[in-house]
Image (spheres, rainbow, N blue to C red):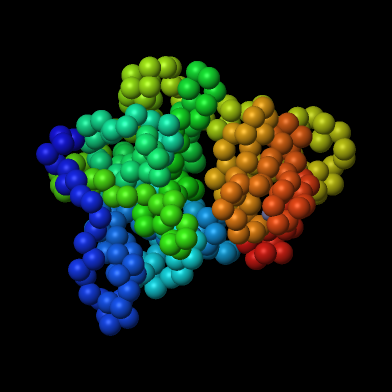
Amino acid sequence: MATEDLEVMEKPSATRRVSADWGRDERVRSVYSHIQRLADLGLKPIPRWGGGHALPGTNHRAFADNPPAPREVACADYSGGLAILTGTAHPLGGYVLGVDIDEGPTTLPGLPRGFLYAETGTASGKFHMFTRVADRLDGQVNLIAGSGQLVAEIKGYGHALRSWPSLPPDKPRGYTPLAWATHIEVDAPLLSAQQTAEGISDWLSRTLGCEVSIKSRERLRRLPQRSRKASHGNSIFDQVKTAVTVEALAERFTTLRPAGKARLKGLCPLHIERTPSFHINTDRDLWYCFGACQRGGDVIILAQCLMDKGLL
Ligand SMILES: [Zn+2]
């Protein structure tokens, strides 16, 4: 997409007056105009509670298939902020793909065909970009530098990205709108999710001056040792443990990031928190929350805890 197709802007103007209640609060009007603008581009925002998961009893996959209407979103509780769903079917064809750049250059390149929206992050080199692709990416792939550092995440079905404006106001870690697509009707998605990931990987390799490669989440870690579990017996619990890893269950409720060899961490799906204290040992297929929960165990115990919270 050529740069002239982009409308670079500061902040959505808060002139839309929806009701007397909205009009009273500048911040709420800004939220509404942001939600409306996202909806105009076919992007589906959702309220987040605590950042760890979208809403109690749901997950991002369910929301991607059945997203709330802008009106429903506008009525919701923003105490945990706002996020944009990825993996949703776009009204004009294709699927929404999210790109979360954690360690990028200071400016974005010419944006890809199918581009929808970009926002700048909380520090230099942090960006969110949303685009339409021809196919639906299931889950997430990571872009990793040669040093092993996570540089960017490409998010599809089952994921979401936190978006401007960050709420509540005492959590000023938000993203600021950078560019909106102006001709989405003519910008049909041509690229697949894989091609888009490859293009972003090439761009980051060039601009960062190091090799950045695509790693699926599965290849980031060794698979749990299933033979060890199988030897414990054939109860229903053993069968479940063999079929479902802690990681596979947890990532339905939270975003996991690499945290060392055979370790993942993320915001705890069982309590509301701002810094990740939920840890997974993928070798042993065990989890522990070092935050408010102070408990852990195997996948059965995690499932039980999620059920106790009404999440599963
Ligand atoms: Zn916890």
Please state the horizontal and vertical placement of residue 96, each as a whole percent of the image: 35, 46
Residue 93 visible in the snapshot: no
Residue 218 visible in the snapshot: yes
User: Where is the C terminus found, in terms of image quarters?
Assistant: bottom right
Nearer-the-camera pick, 174 or 65: 174
Report the image quarter containing ligand 1.
bottom right
Which residue occupies 76% across, 53% down?
A: 294
Where residue 46 sits, quadrant-wise, is bottom left
User: Where is the N terminus found, in terms of image quarters?
Assistant: top left
- Residue at the outermost left position: 4
Please state the horizontal and vertical placement of residue 108, each as a whole percent of the image: 28, 33
Which residue occupies 48% across, 65% down?
A: 79
Q: Is residue 81 left or right of residue 237?
A: left
Q: Is residue 29 left or right of residue 271?
A: left
> How many numbered circles are shown?
0
Which residue occupies 71% across, 64% down?
A: 308
Q: Is residue 85 left or right of residue 260?
A: left
Q: Is residue 271 left or right of residue 29?
A: right
**In the picture shown, does residue 234 fall above or below 91?**
above
Please state the horizontal and vertical placement of residue 52, each as a whole percent of the image: 56, 54
Please state the horizontal and vertical placement of residue 146, each as a whole percent of the image: 50, 18
